[in-house]
Amino acid sequence: MTDPAARCAEEIVALHRVFEATLGAPGTDDAGRYEAAFAPGFTMVMPNGHRLERAEVLAFLRGARGVRGAGFRIAIEDAAPLHVAPPLVLMQYVERQWVGGAETARRACALFDIGGLAPRWLFVQETWITPPAG
């Protein structure tokens, strides 16, 4: 069986590749992938402190195709476990984004349920490292 933290690290990278494709290219969407990834009850705290429920995150992603432009990129760095207690795994990572030549960075903690075939996101908390200019 694959290491639980490694499975979660792979999921973090894989889902952010989907975000990158969706937000960077008009017409690209994988709503089924998001719905499968985010468990019922999923919540997210944005770097500005705003809390979003699962339905709000899904609605944003469905309406955000191509909003960041063709040069949009995301990189995931330093994905590592903070706590592993199956079926729950708490991970941390740094997410860097490039939009129109500007870079932002945020540190995130994500709680996963690894009890199924693929890790499911239960909660994410993001904090700015490098916020957007202005």
Image: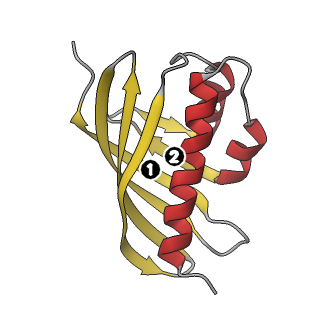
Pointer 2: what residue?
43
Q: Is residue 43 above or below residue 88?
A: above
Left or right, 6 with reference to 128: right
Give the Cα distance between marks 1 and 2. Answer: 7 Å
Q: Mark 1: few, some, or many residues within 10 Å (few <14, many ≥20)?
A: many
- Disc 2 residue type (three-letter): Thr
Which residue corresponds to mark 1?
Answer: 124
Residue 124 at what x, y percent from top left?
Answer: 44, 50
Which residue type carries mark 1?
Answer: Val
Q: How many marks?
A: 2
Q: Residue 39 in the image: x percent, y percent?
A: 65, 55
User: Which quadrant holds the C terminus?
Assistant: top left
User: 64 or 101, which is in the foreground?
Assistant: 101
Quadrant for residue 103, please give it. top left
Dots 1 and 2: beta carbons under 8 Å? yes
Which percent across, then down, holds residue 73? 46, 31
Q: Which mark is residue 53?
A: none
Q: Residue at x 66, y 52 (%)?
A: 37
Tell whether 29 sits left or right of 80. Answer: right
